[in-house]
Amino acid sequence: MAMFYRELARNRKQVLIWMLVLTLSSILILAMYPSIAEQADQYNEIMKSSPKAMISGLGAQNLDFGRVLDFFAYIVPYLVLAVAIFAMLLGAGMLAKEEEEKTIEFLLAKPVTRAEIITAKYAAALFYLLLFNVVLTVANYLAIEVVRGKSAYSLKAFLLISTGAFLVQWTFLSLGFFLSVFVVRSKVLTSLSLGVVFGFYFVSIASAVSEKLADLKYVTPFQYVNAANIIRDERLDGVYLLIMFAVIVLMTIGTYVAYQRKDIKG
């Protein structure tokens, strides 16, 4: 437990900054809804006259700016992208920083196994990711309640969107942990992590705008949570859920196995 609390303390400032910035940004965007709702017909006409490929790429199919949850769904892809970056960087930094900062010898000299090190760090990262999502979800819910006026919405759909977004972030957190076993230099790891996140994001857009690349939707986590589809169906796609859980499990097991075999240099 001491190592778990140590990791919470080491990452507290980073998490609080990300949480504050993204939560306030989401609230400020949602605060624009009343003025946009007054001109919903004009915005809807603009969306209808826009190229279908562009609308698909934005994940804004059949959204009505006069409905508060549809407006929220329009900003969800950008919110998920931002928090996915946070999750990837958080996971990637947990193990790598010990070697880069030359503190790994201190840890290995203690009566703890490598598996215990990974477990403590993973638990701390997952705790912060859960906390981040709880705060963000509550803030978004309260903001929606304040600005929605007479616009009714499905609480179930809202919670499903939030749950799906968390699972996408957990997927990237696990990917970050796995990468940090092999890359320890922070600059390289940061660039690689950003490249992975944005790479998946661009693949998501490509799969949405091109029918020839439609099958790539199974490759990118950003396609697993389509807010417009969730509002329509009020469910998360079982295939996408299975893929995300499979990636999380495989990356987590891979991290334990690779770290046990790694030749760690202090």
Image (spheres, rainbow, N blue to C red):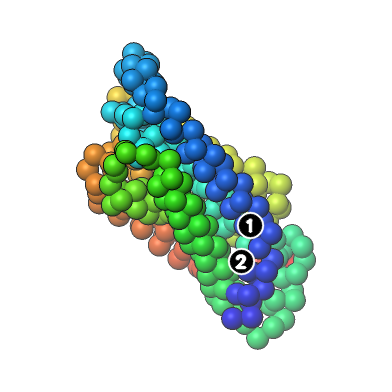
Residue highlighted by disc 1: 16
Name the outermost residue toward the top. Answer: 49
Q: Which mark is residue 262?
A: 2
Quadrant in which the C terminus appears: bottom right
Nearer to us: label 1 or label 2: 1
Q: Nearer the viewer, residue 34 or 56?
A: 34
Give residue 143's position: percent from left, percent from top.
46, 46
Task: Tell me the amino acid under the disc marked 2.
Answer: Lys
Q: Earlier in the sequence, mark 1 or mark 2?
A: 1
How many numbered badges does the structure rendering display? Answer: 2
Placement of 44 over or under 247, stated as above or below: above
CA separation in Å, label 1 and label 2: 32 Å
Q: Is residue 173 at all visible to an observer of this figure?
A: no
Task: Tell me the amino acid under the disc marked 1.
Answer: Leu
Residue at (69% x, 83% y) in the render: 110
Name the outermost residue toward the left. Answer: 233
| SS state under label 2 | loop
Left or right, 256 with reference to 108: left
Quadrant in which the N terminus appears: bottom right
The quadrant where residue 62 appears? top left
Give residue 169's position: percent from left, percent from top.
47, 52
